[in-house]
Image: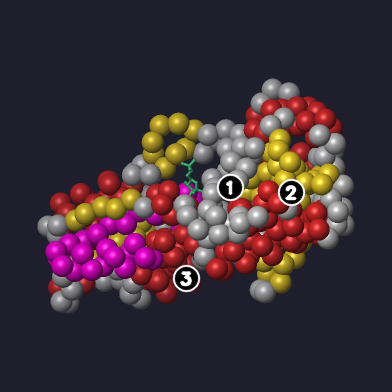
Amino acid sequence: MRVGILTGGGDCPGLNAVIRAVVRKGENVYGHQLVGYRQGWRGVLDGDVIELTVGATRGLLPRGGTLLGTSRTNPLEREGGVAAVQATLARDRVDALVAIGGEDTLGVAAELGDHGVCSVGVPKTIDNDLSATDVTFGFHTAVQVATDAIDRLQTTAESHDRVMVVEVMGRQTGWLALWSGLAGGAHEILVPERPFDVDEVCDRLRHRHAGGASYSIVVVAEGAQLAGASLRVQAAGVDEFGHVRLGGIGSALGPEIEARTGYETRVTILGHVLRGGTPSAFDRILATRFGLAAIDAVHDQDFATMVALRGIDIVRVPVADAVRTLKTVPDALLEDAAVFFG
Ligand code: F6P
């Protein structure tokens, strides 16, 4: 078989580890030929393809980013996009694709399946918001980077008796904010799932400081919203999947806290730092196992599936199911976190 690989959406640590595993097993075990499309679905639309061999993919395991590049191109939004995808795959004699991405990239793969494009999906995103898998690769690394940052902010916050607002990514879900906030001992965690009231946040901070604390750490997900208002801070622009670019809620929140409490407050936006650099050991292993399972599924011609982690097993699930609902943070976990607030 000839198998194409693409990485779409925001990058995350572990993408290269998946590519390496797909190529290694595809070539060495199954004798398949592998090619890579550059910049996600854009490369398939434009016919931008490179050969991928075991030799060309050595040393990739610890490397962040993606050898293939990525984009948020949506072929279904382009005039003649489906036909262009079909034409490229026919030209390159590619029988099937391994599509590595989040809900957008995999949603395209699911729809293209109805047009005869065979694919197997691999779930990635630092947001960890895909419901069909226990966890996506990239998340664990991002949590560790955020936790390291929070640890550092704890000591400088304590030295200066300050409130530190730390903004992390998380467009629609608060997994990253919650996990890093719990691991870093945050005193307030604000997530998109539960709109917040600034006065209530300030009351809890006052209570904490009245009890003897001299500083506080507030972790806020970029997609967190004020209750009853629409302070969902966003930069200009919408991508081809209709997502606004978020970022800046921390900058809006910090001065509000300072004005209402009188506590000196500083804001740190971690942003894309969370997505860069080498994957953690956990993500290297998960990405590797996903890659091996994906090429197995391709070899079995078990298309329109996505590989997923369930417990310690890698399983196959229908890709359409995998992108149907977002995995949001359950109330019970937010209640656990709240034990440490105030
Ligand atoms: O990949 C998910 C994500 O990291 C979100 O958390 C964030 O909102 C978005 O990507 C940022 O995208 P971009 O890199 O295009 O600014």
Nearest to viewer (mark 2 / mark 3): 2
- SS class of the residue under badge 1? loop
Q: Which residues are magenta?
A: 147-174
Mark 2, other Cα within 10 Å: few <14 / some 14–19 / many ≥20: some
2 or 1: tag closer to the N-terminus: 2
Amino acid type, label 3: Leu
Splitting the image into 4 quarters, where does residue 265 fall?
A: bottom left
The disc at residue 333 is: 3
Splitting the image into 4 quarters, where does residue 82 fall?
A: top right
Mark 3, other Cα within 10 Å: few <14 / some 14–19 / many ≥20: few
Q: Is residue 25 magenta?
A: no
Amino acid type, label 2: Thr
Q: Is residue 168 magenta?
A: yes
The residues tagged by marks 2 and 1 sit, at their Cα atoms, a distance apart of: 15 Å
Seen in the image, is 132 located left or right of residue 30?
A: left
The residues tagged by marks 3 and 1 sit, at their Cα atoms, a distance apart of: 32 Å
Which residue in the rendered view is the most extreme toward the left?
A: 262
Seen in the image, is 259 located left or right of residue 7?
A: left
Residue 112 percent across, percent down from the top left: 76, 39
Q: Is residue 337 above or below residue 195?
A: below
Nearest to viewer (mark 2 / mark 1): 2
Seen in the image, is 116 located left or right of residue 168?
A: right
Nearest to viewer (mark 3 / mark 1): 1
- SS class of the residue under badge 3? helix
Amino acid type, label 1: Thr
Q: Nearer the viewer, residue 307 or 278?
A: 278
Residue located 75% across and 61% down the image: 293
Residue annotated with mark 1? 66
The disc at residue 53 is: 2
